[in-house]
Amino acid sequence: MAATIKDVAKQAGVSTATVSRVINNDKHIAPDTRERVLRIISDLNYTVNNVARSLKINRTHTVGLITPAIAEDFFMQVAQGAETVLRKEGYTPIICNSNEELEEETARIRLLLEQQTDGVIIIPATNRGEHFDMLTSNHIPYVLVDRVVDETKADAVLVDNINGAYEATEYLINRGYRRFGFLGGDIEHQSNARERFVGFKRALEDYKIELEEDLLKYGDFHERSGYELIGSFLNNDRAPEVVFISNYYMYVGAVKYLIRNKDTMKQPVYLASFDDMAFSEVNGLPSLNIAQPIQEIGMEAARLLLSRIRGEELPYPQIRRLKTRLVHHNT
């Protein structure tokens, strides 16, 4: 028969409450008591009945994390940061993929509710948030990451997209560049894409530089989009000197186009891009990249969510923006 918490308490000469406090890492337990209880737990091969424990304390110590594209490095680094904080606090993440679809995101929320997760971290797939009401009505706290959602009041952890884009554009202006191209995401439906365009545009306006409509292109934040869009305006007499690209994956596509077509291009082009990851440094092309503290985003989201789970008194909603920094490659 499997050992019970009462067996552990009896052999250790303590109460079952003390055993429970040791299991839950209570810092007020005396070191010698903790060591004795842990030794007995090991000797008896005692394991916690997490199902019974969850029913008793109304907690599963799990947190859902919904990402729009689970295979992409950015989202997995966010997840890694969140998991680092959650693990230290005794929580296990359940990672789900929405495939950038509202219906899938809604289904994943339902699944997490069925699993009785204590909270959810969401990187929104769209700019719609009415399905988040399922969490609110079930008293499950959630935190948005990377993007906010139109007409939805919620905690969020973001980066300072506007100032990050502004600083990069200003730096290039001060280097003498005057003719700018722009490759952006869906500025109508994605808040981060919209904010990065605002920062870029504001810098040009502040320095009295013309914003040329034919050099503004919008895609979907994916590699293929970057490849096709940069090719659409480089091979003509009015090509830009520098192209500002709104995210890493569009940047990867743009770099591939430049490398494959370097012998036919009429003039060189300098790239500036939001995000700084592995490919940014090794592709051999000079660039200015706006680095986000990606893992710290996930860590901060986990900290905020745990604060809500514990019922800490915080103004609502919490909108936390982390700073970016400029990184130069191959210059």
Image (cartoon, helix red, strand yellow):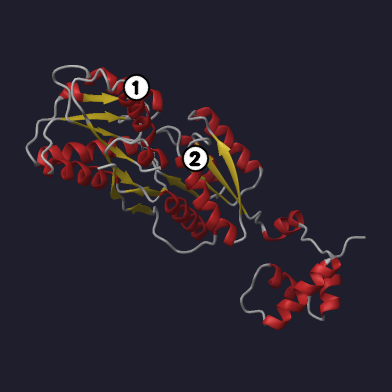
Q: Is residue 68 left or right of residue 191?
A: right
Q: Residue 41, percent across and down?
A: 80, 69
Q: Earlier in the sequence, mark 2 or mark 1?
A: 2
Q: Which residue is mark 1?
A: 260
Q: Residue furthest front?
A: 263
What amino acid type should be assigned to the residue bearing mark 1?
Arg
User: Are the residues at dot 2 and dot 1 in contact (C-beta closer than 8 Å)?
Assistant: no
Instruction: Report which quarter residue 247 is drawn in.
Output: top left
Relative to 273, 299 lies left or right: right
Secondary-structure class at tag 2 = helix
Tell me: 213 left or right of 18. left
Local packing at callout 1 (Cα closer than 10 Å; few below 14, some 14-19, many 20+) is few
Q: Residue at x 46, y 57 (%)?
A: 304
Q: Which residue shows up at 72% across the image and 70% down it?
A: 20
Which corner quadrant of the image does residue 219 belong to?
A: top left
User: Type of residue at label 2?
Assistant: Phe
Q: How many marks?
A: 2
Q: Quadrant of the C terminus?
A: top left
Residue 132's mark? 2
Mark drawn on residue 156: none
Q: Position of residue 322 (x, y in %)?
A: 34, 53
